[in-house]
Amino acid sequence: MSNEHNIVILISGSGSNMAAIVRAARRDNWAQKYRARVAAVISNKADAGGLAQAQELGVLTEVVEHQVFSDRDDPRGAFDAELARRIESHRPALVVLAGFMRILSPSFVAQFQGRLMNIHPSLLPAFPGLHTHQRALDAGCRVTGATVHMVTADLDSGPILAQAVVPVVLGDTAGTLVERVLHQEHLIYPAAIEAWLSQHAAA
Ligand code: GRF
């Protein structure tokens, strides 16, 4: 339907943020408020746990495996082009990265500029990149958290939409922080998407 505001979610792993977004969309009636729905979940890994979760939630799933392109002259460009083609087939108003563990090329980011969102498990601009919880512990941070941001060509550095602060307590490990931060991610990511929809896709 041309007046739908389709959301496409990209995952690589367990998909807990994806599931939180799908559930929030239903619970908070995004279909009626914004004519918005999660149209598809796309993974770059065929064994991503989130694919089964998405199917249980009744959401269409697709796989675009990056390894398939490894023998091309430009593997990253070929993968990004195919991924972009599959995403665009859903005519998305918004593309949501939820634990999608591939760095996207500048041309991919340019194609989706202004409609590409990510969540990162640190209080950006602190700790872009990987191993954020261990790095926060090693630095002696008393707080850490998560950030929802628009995606730009520079890694983990686009305009910030939402943040949640999580205290670091005595005895915390990267494992305990993962859990407490994820709990907050599941709250702020749907909220940030709904705020974006209310600005860009009001019914
Ligand atoms: C989250 O911590 C997110 O911030 C990061 O990757 C993780 C994905 O977890 N980008 P899940 O697949 O949503 O459970």
Image (cartoon, rainbow, N blue to C red):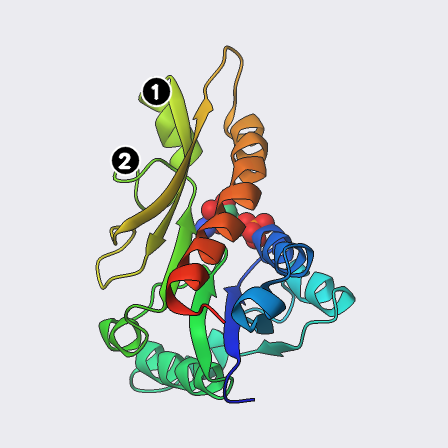
- Identify the residue under disc 2: 126
Question: Left or right: 122 with respect to 128?
Answer: right
Question: Left or right: 15 with respect to 120?
Answer: right
Rendered location of residue 161, percent (x, y): 34, 48
Question: Left or right: 104 with respect to 60?
Answer: left
Rendered location of residue 79, percent (x, y): 40, 80
Q: For residue 167, what is the image quadrant?
A: top left
What residue appears at the point 72 percent right and 61 percent down from the top-left corner? 53
- Marks 1/2 in contact by CB < 8 Å: the verdict is yes
- Identify the residue under disc 1: 141
Q: Earlier in the sequence, mark 1 or mark 2?
A: 2
Q: Residues within 10 Å of mark 2 (few under 14, many from 20)?
A: few
What residue appears at the point 61 percent right and 60 percent down from the top-left corner? 25
Name the one closer to the observer, 117 or 201.
Answer: 201
Q: Is residue 23 visible?
A: yes
What residue appears at the point 23 percent right and 71 percent down from the top-left corner? 106
Disc 2 marks which amino acid? Ala
Above or below for 90 versus 168: below
Element on which disc 1 rests? loop
What residue appears at the point 43 percent right and 32 percent down from the top-left corner? 133
Element on which disc 2 rests? loop
Mark number for residue 194?
Answer: none
Q: Looking at this view, name the residue that lies furthest to the top.
A: 170
Q: For residue 75, what is the image quadrant?
A: bottom left
